[in-house]
Image (cartoon, rainbow, N blue to C red):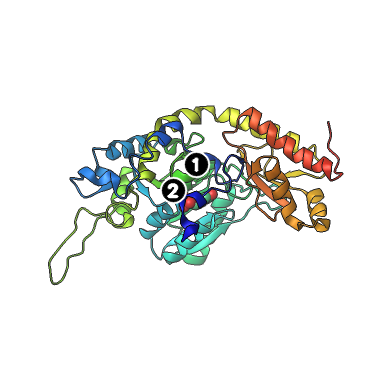
Amino acid sequence: MNRYSPNNLKRPSKGLINIHPIQRGGILTEEARKILLEWADGYSVCDVCLEGRVDLLRNPPVDELKQDVAEFLGMDTARFTAGARHAKFAVMSAFQRGTLVLDSLAHYTSYTSAELNDMRVFEVPNSGYPDFRVDPEMYAETFERVREETGSYPDLALLTHVDYRYGNLADAERVGKICEEYEVLFVLNTAYSSGVMEVNGKKLRTAFIVASGHKSWAATAPIGILATNYELSDRVFRTSKMRGDWSGRAFTKKELAVFGCSPVFGLPVMTLMASFPGVVERVKHWNEEIEKARWFVREMEKIEGVQLIGERPKNHTLMHFESPAFHSIAKKHRKRGYFLYHELKKRGVFGVQAGMTKNFKVNIYGLSWEDLDKVVSAFKDIAENYGVEVED
Ligand SMILES: *Cc1c(COP(=O)(O)O)cnc(C)c1O
């Protein structure tokens, strides 16, 4: 059992600049770090629970947080979920055996949520290599295709605001308008956007906003957000109607889609709370993040053969590169595809997936210019050491 001793529980990325795509927006704020020990025990938030639901707690102020988060997203109300995936599952559970249209860059959890709810799924195509754009007008076309095949328009249309493969920012406003015209409920998956950039459901005409606390709101996993409007809230947050046939017990206040109370207590909700003021502030500085991302692309593309895939210019800090030169090195290298991972680690940079050289993804969100420069220098240095040309 020595393997589990605290001395042996060291994080592989400790002390390194972590550019792993999923890590940047989940790094805790200073404020969240300060409350870690106090709220770390089990059901810590449940000390004073009067109503039997985490989202109604007054102390700590989870009820208030839920409303502040909803308002921040331009929605009427919200609940905390076990992640973006559970938020999607919760929405779809109110439309079981219905029809769902989603973009072809959607996350696997959009498909698994649909499958678990027996939904019929229709994909909106994307433009393919090299920019993989989703054309909003294709939503209208797909709605028509759904009507031809099923006799009616879909129940839900899901758009991945920023996709996890290319970091493309979809035109949510246009998709929202189309959904409004067709009277299809619009689900916006903001796992990679809300919490780092401004997202306003009123402006985007969303029926549901799905968010990921551990991916983009500086919170400890697992926590997600499902925000909606008053008209839909009773449907998606419907309460229990069951009665025990022998005991006669009933649970009329418990909401089904969040397992009665909430799947998140303790640190997930408390770190989200402590980080929230910082998150509200940081989304105002998104432009600087884009500026850094575009600079990063220019510098990386000075390395022979390195090329950004996905939309350009970048509108997000998650990016995907092709790098045939690194791939050629890997073919001859003793460590094969793992050489890039090791070379980066030697230079203090962590997070490019081990084994990847032909393509790789990085996320530079929240890096200082100084750290960003270290990352660029590491890539360039590795290239030069293996005889790959780097422009000045
Ligand atoms: C990361 C990601 C998810 C999963 O988020 P969880 O909060 O971990 O469930 C869902 N959708 C997209 C687009 C993602 O990038």
Q: Which amino acid does label 1 sit on?
A: Gly
Q: Does the residue labelled 2 lie within 8 Å of ligand 1?
A: yes
Residue situated in front as seen by the camera: 259 or 202: 259
- Residue 26's tag is 1
The residue sitting at 46% across, 54% down in the picture is: 5
Q: Where is residue 215 in the image (x, y as percent from the top left)?
A: 50, 45
The residue sitting at 31% across, 57% down in the picture is: 259
Tell me: 367 left or right of 275.
Answer: right
Q: Determine the image quadrant of residue 301.
A: top right
The residue sitting at 53% across, 61% down in the picture is: 122
Quadrant housing the C terminus: top right
Q: Residues within 10 Å of mark 2 (few under 14, many from 20)?
A: some
Q: Where is residue 183 in the image (x, y as percent from the top left)?
A: 43, 49
The residue sitting at 48% across, 62% down in the picture is: 112
Q: What residue type is labelled 2?
A: Ala
Find disc 2 in the rendering and name its residue: 221
Residue situated in front as seen by the camera: 335 or 244: 335
Q: Earlier in the sequence, mark 2 or mark 1?
A: 1
154 shown above or below 219? below
Cβ–Cβ under 8 Å for marks 2 and 1: yes
Marks 2 and 1 sit apart, C-alpha to C-alpha, by 8 Å
**SS type, badge 1:** helix
